[in-house]
Image (tube, rainbow, N blue to C red):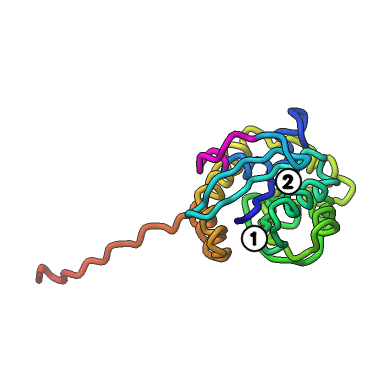
Amino acid sequence: MILLVGLGNPGEKYARNRHNIGFMAADAIVRRHSFSPLRARFQGLVSEGTLDGAKAIVLKPTTYMNESGRAVGEALRFYKLTEADVIVFHDELDLAPAKLRIKTGGGAAGHNGIRSIAAHIGPDFRRVRIGIGHPGEKDRVLNAVLGDFSKAEMTGWVEPLIEAIADAAPLLAEGKDATFANKVHLALNPEPPKKKTDETKNGDA
């Protein structure tokens, strides 16, 4: 079993915030793979389903970002899981918009949701880092992450990205993290078709 955690802040006020792209990814996985309806549990919203035959739980903490670890810790203990079974989807300032990276362990890099989870369960969980871009100046970060994606951003890259994440999610259940990241990248950046070479010369077949 794996626990897929989408990070964000609860409520309509925050629904389209850049900080909530983890929630968006979690919702896309629930829709794409026909998980059960979300229900309140573990200080969050929980949905159950399968990915490539493996049981998976999607969790959206409703404790607000800074206390995300409370929900994750409660779910982890209930299902008797380890850090290695946890995959967290979150926004990443230090990646360009639409870029995605996945890693295991490490520091929080200023992300309060990641810091809270590490404090409750330890740091060695997998993180799907979803780039939202840096506003350029430190004092503009708060307004940037709590600002909404524009309509152009939503249709231009946010929606295609979260759908690509949902499509590739079964690879995470298989532990194929690099393949997952590559599949998402190719979905957004398809390789150009190869040019056909003309093998006939001077009319010779």
Quadrant in the picture for the C terminus:
bottom left
Q: Residue at x 65, y 51 (%)?
A: 4
Amino acid carrying mark 2 in the image: Leu
Q: x, y percentage for residue 64?
A: 82, 40
Q: Residues within 10 Å of mark 2 (few under 14, many from 20)?
A: many
Instruction: State the residue position of label 1.
Output: 101
**In the picture shown, does residue 66 fall above or below 201?**
above
Q: Residue at x 77, y 67 (%)?
A: 106
Amino acid carrying mark 1 in the image: Arg
Q: Residue furthest top?
A: 12
Task: Give the secondary structure at mark 1.
Answer: strand
Residue 38 placement: quadrant: top right
Mark 2 or mark 1, whichever is nearer to me: 2
Can residue 96 be seen at all in this image of the molecule? no
User: Which stretch did the figure color magenta?
Assistant: 30-38
Q: Residue at x 62, y 40 (%)?
A: 47
Instruction: State the residue position of label 2.
Output: 7
Horizontal relation, residue 93 to residue 158: left or right: right
Q: Secondary structure of the magenta portion, mostly?
A: loop
Q: Residue furthest right?
A: 139
Viewer-side residue, 42 vs 31: 42
Q: x, y percentage for residue 192?
A: 41, 57
Quadrant in the picture for the N terminus:
bottom right
Q: Residue at x 16, y 71 (%)?
A: 201
